[in-house]
Each structure stands twice: as C-alpha cells, then as structure tokens.
Image (spheres, rainbow, N blue to C red):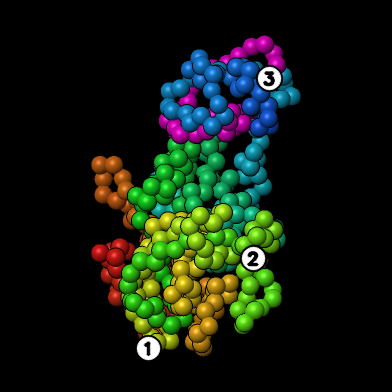
C-alpha cells in the first residue's frame, strides 16, 4: 500500500453489482485480499465498513487504498482476450444478433455451440463476449441454454442490466417460451407439470431393464452421465420444477409439436418433464422414453428457446423471437407442422 486513498463513484451502469466484483474490476486483487481490506476497514462504502456481498447503488462513494505499482494495475480479466478474438468471431456474434439496445443483447444461439467453456469444450459464446466490451464493462450471460438447445440467449451489457434481468428471471416476471418436437403425444394435451427433481449420476448397470440412478454420486464430476431424476420434497439437493405445456399439433401418435413455458429454471427441466410425460424430446439421448422413435427426421435435439417476453417500465413488454433452427424447420416440413398454427403472439398457446 502507498498510504494514499482514492474515492470513486458508482455509476448507474454498475447499479446492483457486488462490492467485491466492483473492486476486482479496478485492481488486481484476490478474493482473500479483498476480504482482508474490507475486514480491516481500508475499503469503505459511503464512509462505512461493508461486506464483500454488499450490493452497490448508483452514487455510492467507494474508498479504495492506492496499491503499490505492481498491484495497482487494472485487473486484466477476460477483457484482455478481446484483442485476440478473430474477425470471424466478431462477425459471427453480429450474424446471430436478434435484438440490441443500450442494456442488452439477444443472440440466436445455434444448436451444438456451448454457452460456456468447460472440460472438452472449445469455442463458446461466453469466450467471445469480450469482443463486445465497451472498455469499461464486459457483457455477461444472464441465463444459460444447453449446448444442444438453440434459440434466444440474453446477454447484459453492464452490471446494472445484469442485476435487473437476472432478477426478472428469478421473480418469474419474464416469460420464456420453448418449442419442442416430442416422441409420441403428451396426454393430456395441455396442462402443468410439477415435480421435485434432483441431480444425480446415471449408473452404467441396469436392473429390471432400467438404468440405475445414483443420487449419492452427485459430487462425481462426470457431466456426460450427470442428469436429473424424480425426487421427493426434503431430499438433499431436490428442487421443485414447474412447466406449463400445450400441444400445438400432432403427426398421428408418432410425434407432437409442443409449446413449453417453464415457471422455474432448473437444469434440464424441460427435457426431464417431457420424459415424465413419457414423450421425450426428439433427439434427446440423455432423457429417452421407451416409445418408438419416428424415422426419417432430421438429427439433433428438437428443443429451442422460441421467445422471451421482457417486461419494461412505462412501455409494452419487449418480445424477442428466434426463428426455427434449420433441423427443426426440416422436421416441421416433414411432419406437416405449420408455424402459423401457434399464432403470432409467442404466448398465444398459453392464453
């Protein structure tokens, strides 16, 4: 430390940011160092001591100690990678943009492209977002889609937007509509699915013709075998999941086009709920029912995020709609499904 301090004002775009994250965007410190500076009162907010998880409001004054030269350099973070991104990647992000304003960006994520990095993952959306940085704020993901699920993916351009949009997801004030093609036809054709589900690891052995699920192996790092399965309230790790659904059209009893509106946001929720109806999503090899799969249809997961309906103050809700992905468009044509059957409003199947 140099013994000097500076005071910075929280901007409107930083509204709702955690204090520790706000600090680390400015100085290269570990989480432990940030905690120590807060604990000893060397970092203060509006003259008072604060905790790492304090949420900042616009106009707050944050007192920061000036660090030695080697430590006072701005944290490089992921924004430093922006210069390394190829022109092709930047053009790719532009090509899949559905909507953009000062606060957010909506992308049409293709099936097969991961949202975030991980073991064995190569190119992914999160790794490309640094290219969209304004120099002060790096855009961040507001929610997630499975790698094989396509459709609307929301990105916040600054921390205040991220906090507001994330709260809309948590509070269920934002409507999310998915379309799926299922193996067989859900019965009844419309309704709501409610159940408790828990993350587990699928065992390779079988008992009585069914694969065994081991809930005690949740800590085992094996994403290929990790999945959700039915549980009971009170079981450790169990989460309640709720999905509204409506069958829009059918191809006999072979397949159905289903609109889905999740009320909660659990891992693999829609895929698991369709399996619970004994009508798994076409192309989903992790959650397969025992019905005969229709032949001659396009390969790939037939699930995509059709639309987001985002409430706005003093304005009509913003409706962002993604077009059918190519493989589902091909299947629609094969089975005779017509998009206009769902109506112009993405919420029409649920009204």
Q: Is residue 268 left or right of residue 122?
A: left
CA separation, marks 2 and 1? Answer: 36 Å
Position of residue 348 in the picture relative to residue 33 (left or right): left
Return the residue at label 3. Answer: 67
Examine the rendering and report whether any part of residue 18 can be seen. Answer: yes
Q: Is residue 261 above or below residue 162?
A: below
Q: Residue at x 55, y 26 (%)?
A: 51
* Mark 3 or 1, closer to the camera: 1
| Position of 293 relative to 29 (above/below) | below
Residue ID for mark 2: 214
- Quarter of the image for the N terminus: give it: top right
Q: Residue at x 56, y 48 (%)?
A: 129
* Residue 280 among those drawn in magenta: no
> Foreground mark, 2 or 1?
2
Q: Which residues are magenta?
A: 1-27
Q: Residue at x 46, y 78 (%)?
A: 278
Question: Magenta stretch containing residue 26, yes or no?
Answer: yes
Circle 3 SS class: loop
């Amino acid at each position: 430390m140099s013994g000097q301090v500076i005071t910075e004002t929280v901007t409107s775009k930083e509204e709702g940011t955690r204090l520790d994250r706000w600090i680390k965007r400015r100085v290269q410190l570990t989480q432990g160092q940030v905690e120590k500076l807060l604990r000893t009162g060397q970092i203060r907010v509006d003259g008072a001591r604060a905790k790492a998880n304090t949420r900042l409001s616009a106009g707050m004054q944050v007192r920061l100690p000036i660090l030695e030269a080697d430590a006072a350099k701005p944290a490089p973070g992921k924004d430093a990678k922006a210069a390394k991104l190829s022109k092709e990647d930047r053009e790719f992000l532009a090509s899949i943009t559905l909507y953009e304003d000062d606060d957010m960006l909506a992308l049409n994520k293709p099936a097969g492209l991961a949202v975030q990095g991980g073991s064995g993952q190569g190119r992914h959306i999160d790794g490309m977002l640094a290219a969209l940085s304004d120099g002060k704020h790096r855009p961040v993901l507001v929610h997630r889609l499975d790698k094989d699920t396509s459709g609307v993916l929301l990105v916040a351009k600054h921390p205040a937007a991220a906090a507001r949009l994330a709260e809309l997801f948590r509070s269920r004030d934002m409507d999310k509509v998915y379309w799926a093609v299922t193996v067989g036809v859900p019965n009844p054709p419309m309704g709501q699915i409610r159940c408790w589900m828990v993350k587990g690891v699928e065992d390779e052995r079988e008992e009585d013709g069914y694969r065994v699920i081991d809930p005690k192996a949740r800590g085992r790092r094996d994403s290929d075998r990790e999945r959700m399965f039915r549980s009971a309230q009170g079981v450790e790790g169990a989460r309640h999941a709720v999905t509204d659904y409506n069958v829009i059209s059918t191809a006999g009893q072979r397949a159905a086009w289903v609109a889905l509106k999740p009320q909660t946001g659990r891992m693999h929720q829609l895929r698991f709920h369709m399996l619970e109806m004994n009508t798994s999503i076409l192309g989903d090899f992790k959650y397969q029912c025992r019905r005969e799969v229709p032949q001659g249809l396009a390969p790939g997961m037939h699930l995509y995020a059709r639309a987001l309906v985002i409430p706005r103050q003093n304005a009509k809700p913003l409706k962002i709609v993604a077009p059918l992905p190519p493989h589902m468009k091909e299947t629609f044509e094969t089975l005779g499904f017509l998009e206009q059957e769902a109506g112009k409003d993405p919420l029409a199947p649920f009204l």
